[in-house]
Image (cartoon, rainbow, N blue to C red):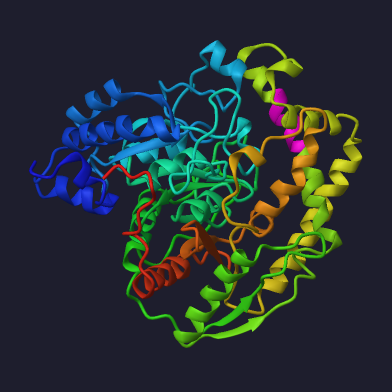
Amino acid sequence: MSTSAYELAHFDAVAQAKLVADGEATPIELVDAAIERIEAVNPSLNAVIIERFDQARAEAGADLPDGPLRGVPFLLKDIGDTQAGTPQHLGNRALKAAGHMSPGDTELGRRFRQAGLVTLGKTNLPELGTVPVTQPLAYGPTNNPWDLDRSPSGSSGGAAAAVASGMVPVAHASDGGGSTRLPASWNGLVGLKTTRGRQPLPHDTSRLLSELVVSRTVRDTAAVLDATHGHTSGCLYHLAPPSRPYTEEPGREIPPMRVGLLTSGGAEYEIHPEAVTAANLGAALLEELGHSVEVVSDDVLFGPESRVNGQLWMTRMRRSVASLGEAIGRPLTADEVEPYNWASAQRAEGVDPAEVFRAQTAQQVWSAKACQWMDQFDLLVTPTSGCPPMRTDELYPDTEKPWRIGRTYGLIGRFTLPFNATGHPAISLPLHWTDDDLPIGTQFVAGMGREDLLIRLGAQLEQVRPWAQRRPNIWAG
């Protein structure tokens, strides 16, 4: 292979797969090159926390599945979908000390393998993936490659930092409240949350969750989605398959759309001006492309009825903390769980089960109202995050009252969580950078099942306002 490890950092996943398919590179050469890049830049970023380099080399040198991404180096987030034989610590110190391992492949983990992706390791995340920053006590903070003093957001912060810095072209990400879109926003990447039911999920995960990847190009996201989408008979939610492969969407015409623009986050939060600029830019580009844009009210998405989402989040936290103990065969103590998660679980301990049921019902009622509200337009444009990348040292919980940081977390994820609750597909695209050269994404939300529209639009905006060749301060090429 004539292309060096550092030159390969500029190739996206589709381009790397083509090198293999055309006989210009072998999977082992791509894997070795990615390992070289990880070893060069990961000490600055702390994005990859678990290495499986020897296993990856063995897999790349053997008979890989003949999938569309055969030989492409890949990283798996250390939560959610799993692959057999990999450590699974979920960002928790007790699971790390116990050497806990993934029991097997989940369906999506298997599909990643069948696509031909080669897993080199696992990426950092906040404990249990519960907050929109990545600085677990078990592994320490991941640094943002655009500014090492800033957070990459979370929970897929390790994945985003790895892709943004050129370690690998794509990496597994999951999104239960914005955890794919927020790191995409703060790292200058593409992050797609699929419609509920588009991807297979482990049976014990929340209905809010979506899993896919973060990438530098829209076509990479489309390629991974093509290789992995579709329910199984055991999935709780089923969707009709797309009418054509997602990789065929770029370049297709988009008829004139009714577009809603939302930049206010309700009375509780003051959205940062740079976040508003990112959304306004997205709306302006759509107007230039011939679409009709209307500013819309925040009354439905952020009205009083939406607060039930926070109540249910705390009860879910209690269950998540209990699951850590189940994984290692004993209950965990307060000094084995991070203060924010422990405090949240404790606050949910006295909640009456009837109150949880009432909150679930209220969430369904709110979700139905939000879905009806969304029907008035073809696309909604918002900021992805309520603020640009924040300094890591500003994002640690107070030791005495850790829940106080929740307001900051709420600002970060203000515009993403509603669509986990409703189930709509949403994508963050890197259209705007601040004067300090910090990326902040624009979110586009489509109707149920319309990932095709988001990919078509994303590819169009990628041509109008190219971003894939922008490079952070820490870059493996």
The question of residue 321 being in magenta is answered with yes
Specify start and end residues of the magenta stretch as a single range: 315-322
Q: Please tell me which residue is depicted at 72% across the width and 73% down the height of the picture.
A: 373
The question of residue 185 being in magenta is answered with no
Q: Please tell me which residue is depicted at 37% across the width and 50% down the height of the picture.
A: 224
Does 195 sit above or below residue 333?
below
Occupied quadrant, residue 318:
top right
Q: Where's residue 228, x and y in %?
A: 40, 48
Horizontally, residue 92 falls left or right of residue 119, namely right
Q: Where's residue 366, x and y in %?
A: 79, 61
Q: Please tell me which residue is depicted at 9% across the width and 45% down the height of the picture.
A: 23
Horizontally, residue 240 falls left or right of residue 95, namely left
Does 459 sit above or below residue 421?
below
In this rendered view, identify the residue nearer to me: 352 or 56: 56
In this rendered view, identify the residue nearer to me: 356 or 276: 276
In this rendered view, identify the residue nearer to me: 269 or 261: 269
Quarter occupied by the C terminus = top left
Q: Please tell me which residue is depicted at 45% across the width and 45% down the height of the picture.
A: 160
Is residue 193 shown to the viewer in this render? no
Q: Where's residue 291, x and y in %?
A: 51, 85
Q: How many marks?
A: 0
Q: Where's residue 73, x and y in %?
A: 29, 38
Is residue 108 shown to the viewer in this render? yes
Quarter occupied by the N terminus = top left
Q: Main secondary structure of the magenta part?
A: helix
